[in-house]
Amino acid sequence: MREALIRRDLVAILRAHHYAPTPFASGSDFLDAARFISPGIAVLDMDLPDMTGLTVLQELLFKRRDIPVVMTSARADIRAAVQTIKRGADDFLEQPVNEADLLATIENSQSLLKNRIIVQKEKMESESILGKLSSREMDVLKELALYGDNSRAASNLNLSVRSVETYRCRIMRKCGAAKFFDVVTMYQRVFA
């Protein structure tokens, strides 16, 4: 019941200031919708009825990079706030949320949103391109992205150095890249 009241109050504040919030009753509802909702700023409670806010944060960051996250909690302390920031939240507000602080935090997050939309678009494009690779090519790419060394990749994958070089050329061709560095950049966009 407490969560519903907090959610209702936040929605009322945001609508009064011409925002169009989309409230969710649970972390799983939000994560299910995260694949489809437009980029925006998430205000996420640490204590959700079905999972922790930190769990939702981690799953969201894996799926989407174009949603800045502001965490809130009624049981906040400095340590909790620092932990949420270290785990990827962009800001932290103590409950009950002060209207002026909420609006200032959302306004500050607007600049993050613009940059993250670009990052998410690049991630999706990279996923599409890397989707053309076979699982073995992805294994080779992963090794080369991690270590940058044909000999080490060959040893780790039980291949010859020549085979790794052949895979490397094939990966570049499939990805339409002139330099292998460009393919590694795509890999890092998706898996970093």
Image (tube, grey):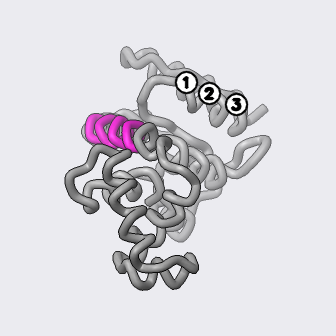
Label pair 1/3, CB-CB below 8 angstroms: no
Left or right of residue 187, residue 133 in this image: right
What residue appears at the point 20 percent right and 52 percent down from the top-left corner? 178
Q: Secondary structure at mark 2?
A: helix
Tag 1: amino acid: Phe
Which residue is label 3 attached to? 29
The three-letter amino acid code for the residue at tag 2 is Ala
Decide if residue 152 is on the left or right side of residue 2: left
Q: Nearer the viewer, mark 1 or mark 3?
A: 1
Q: Residue at x 37, y 45 (%)?
A: 174
Residue at 37% in and 19% down: 17
Q: Which residue is label 2 attached to?
A: 33
Return the residue nearer the eye: 106 or 124: 124
Structural distance between the alpha carbons of marks 2 and 3: 6 Å
Q: Quick check: marks 2 and 3 in contact, CB under 8 Å?
A: yes
- Taking the magenta stretch, the answer to whether it contains residue 143 is no
Q: Quadrant of the N terminus?
A: top right
Residue indicated by mark 1: 36
Q: Is residue 104 visible?
A: no
Instruction: Decide if residue 142 is on the left or right side of residue 28.
Output: left
The amino acid type, in three-letter code, at marker 3 is Asp
Depth check, front residue: 81 or 115: 115
Residues in magenta, as a range: 114-126
**Residue 191 placed where, x, y %?**
47, 57
